[in-house]
Image (tube, rainbow, N blue to C red):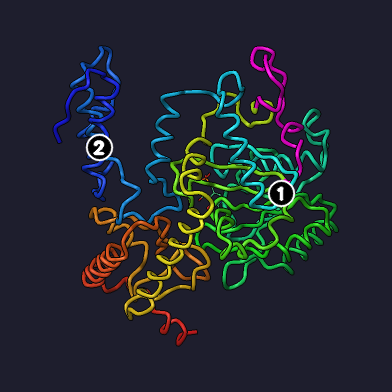
């Protein structure tokens, strides 16, 4: 597409790159690492590159970058393609403020406060507070720090005293809980993975029994992670029942709503998170269901003042003006911090609460259409009725991993796979409500074609169908 020069190199280059992106946006082309090395001069050379040569290289990179917001991408839980949010995020880079002080970030401090306030209200944290984190994993990390420091306020200064702290999450909980236990010194082996029921939800009686056993062994149970929207299945743990058990043992209750907390914006669907106001902390990623670009993640705490207690430091060079209230750096994980609030605030303003509610409804409706299509096709087997936007299914007789790899490497589309209850499945995430159902049906047809080809070429590797499994057991 020809573009007219504005004599402003910034705008011209941005427009050129955007045009290249938009033209290739519908693509699912696959490039191997070797193909990238062969076609992109990756090494950083000694001499400067002229603009023209450089732009060509950047365009080559843009074209070869996997496109994550089109009708061939169902691989991940994130989905940031709402125009206004993308524009706001690009402006964030252009404005380049750091979110530690009002002096440097100005209105964005107040904007961030407004988003955190809205999120706290949606949860039911009347006296709550929050902070933006670089992703749900680190929001979960911050929650574990708050829990540890609440149980033992002295640990921040003197370190651990030798007690063995124990954290609990379900077998379907996100891996960040184990990883974070390693990072904060609890130890990965001190994370108990509580078994789940057939829908992937944590079993309350098993949590109770594990905590009891640990208490009797002289350990210090301190934290339970409940998940609102598990990564593989989209399952919701029963917050009311589980938090009753946890609180009886004085555990900090964290709800990892990285994926599913956005459902709170829908009155019709919010019951999925019933009891969330009982939590001590909640992780909420707006970069998943709310349609804003990565990263946009919040850690919300029921009680105010805990963030400062865990994360404040003295920095005379930085916090020179205004009150701590206006300087979020006094209660953040980071020092220099990207502005992640502007994009979600801009989109939330545009849609309003009602617009978000409608958007969530459209996500669920689209999911239901996909579920019906899969259920009415004898070649597909739905693994379970989804609670959220993950449609988990398999193709009769062909291993899901192989189908996913073939789709990707043939440049036909991206979809992930998982395992639950011994069954391997494809996970199709319907996070973008604007993908047309016809296009999704077309993608399902592509899956069938690829699966049939695999079946023909390698009949030996066929996995048993659900019926065959039932007959064999
Ligand atoms: C349930 C859950 N928690 C945490 C995370 C991690 O979030 P992030 O990728 O923003 O670190 C994910 C990511 O998919 C998730 O599904």
Residue in the picture at 26% in, 72% down:
455
In the visual, does 284 lie left or right of 63? right
Task: Read off the residue under disc 1.
Answer: 125
In this rendering, the answer to whether 298 lies above or below 418 is: above
Tell me the quarter of the picture where residue 321 sits: top right
Q: In which quarter of the image is the N terminus?
A: top left
Residue 372: x percent and y percent? 39, 75
Residue in the picture at 75% in, 62% down:
210
In this rendering, the answer to whether 25 lies above or below 156 is: below
Q: Residue 79, which numbered label?
A: none
Task: Read off the residue under disc 2.
Answer: 36
**What count of labels does the image hold?**
2
Mark 1 is surrounded, within 10 Å at the Cα level, by few (under 14), some (14 to 19) or many (20 or more) other residues, namely: many
Mark 2 is surrounded, within 10 Å at the Cα level, by few (under 14), some (14 to 19) or many (20 or more) other residues, namely: some
Q: Give the range drawn in magenta.
A: 302-327
**Which of the marked residues, 1 or 2, is nearer the chain's N terminus?**
2
Residue 141: x percent and y percent? 64, 41
**Residue farthest bottom in this picture:** 471
Tell me the quarter of the picture where residue 73 sits: bottom left
In the visual, does 186 lie left or right of 236? right
Residue in the picture at 57% in, 23% down:
106
Proximity of marks 1 and 2: CB atoms separated by less than 8 Å: no
In the visual, does 356 lie left or right of 279? left
Residue 201: x percent and y percent? 61, 66
Decide which of 183, 252 is in the foreground and name it. 252
Q: Indicate yes or no whether the magenta region holds residue 320.
A: yes
Q: Is mark 2 on a helix, strand or loop?
A: helix
Residue 294: x percent and y percent? 46, 41
């Amino acid at each position: 597409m020809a573009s007219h020069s504005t004599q402003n190199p910034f705008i011209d280059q941005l427009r050129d790159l955007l045009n290249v992106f938009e033209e290739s946006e519908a693509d699912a082309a696959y490039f191997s690492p070797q193909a990238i090395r062969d076609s992109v001069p990756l090494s950083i050379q000694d001499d400067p590159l002229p603009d023209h040569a450089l732009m060509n290289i950047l365009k080559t990179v843009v074209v070869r970058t996997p496109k994550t917001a089109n009708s061939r991408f169902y691989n991940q839980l994130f989905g940031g393609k709402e125009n206004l949010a993308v524009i706001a995020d690009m402006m964030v880079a252009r404005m380049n403020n750091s979110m530690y002080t009002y002096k440097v970030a100005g209105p964005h401090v107040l904007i961030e406060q407004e988003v955190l306030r809205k999120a706290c209200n949606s949860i039911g944290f009347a006296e709550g507070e929050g902070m933006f984190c670089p992703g749900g994993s680190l929001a979960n990390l911050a929650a574990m720090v708050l829990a540890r420091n609440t149980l033992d306020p002295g640990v921040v200064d003197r370190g651990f005293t030798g007690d063995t702290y124990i954290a609990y999450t379900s077998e379907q909980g996100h891996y960040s809980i184990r990883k974070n236990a390693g990072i904060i010194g609890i130890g990965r082996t001190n994370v108990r993975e509580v078994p789940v029921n057939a829908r992937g939800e944590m079993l309350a009686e098993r949590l109770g029994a594990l905590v009891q056993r640990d208490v009797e062994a002289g350990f210090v149970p301190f934290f339970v992670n409940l998940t609102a929207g598990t990564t593989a299945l989209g399952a919701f743990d029963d917050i009311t029942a589980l938090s009753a058990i946890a609180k009886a043992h004085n555990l900090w209750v964290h709800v990892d709503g990285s994926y599913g907390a956005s459902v709170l914006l829908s009155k019709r669907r919010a019951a999925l998170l019933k009891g969330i106001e009982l939590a001590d902390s909640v992780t909420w990623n707006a970069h998943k269901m709310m349609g804003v670009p990565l990263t946009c993640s919040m850690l919300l705490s029921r009680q105010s003042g805990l963030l400062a207690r865990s994360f404040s430091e003295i920095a005379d060079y930085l916090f020179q003006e205004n009150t701590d209230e206006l300087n979020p750096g006094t209660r953040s994980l980071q020092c220099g911090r990207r502005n992640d609030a502007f994009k979600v605030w801009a989109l939330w303003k545009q849609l309003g609460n009602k617009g978000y509610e409608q958007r969530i409804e459209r996500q669920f409706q689209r999911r239901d259409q996909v579920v019906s299509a899969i259920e009415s096709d004898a070649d597909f087997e739905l693994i379970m009725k989804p609670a959220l936007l993950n449609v988990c299914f398999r193709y009769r007789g062909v291993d899901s991993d192989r189908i996913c790899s073939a789709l990707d490497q043939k440049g036909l589309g991206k979809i992930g796979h998982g395992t639950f209850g011994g069954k391997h499945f494809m996970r199709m995430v319907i996070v973008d409500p604007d993908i047309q159902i016809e296009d999704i049906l077309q993608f399902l047809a592509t899956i069938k074609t690829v699966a049939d080809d695999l079946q023909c070429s390698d009949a030996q590797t066929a996995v048993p169908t659900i019926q065959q499994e039932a007959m064999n057991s």
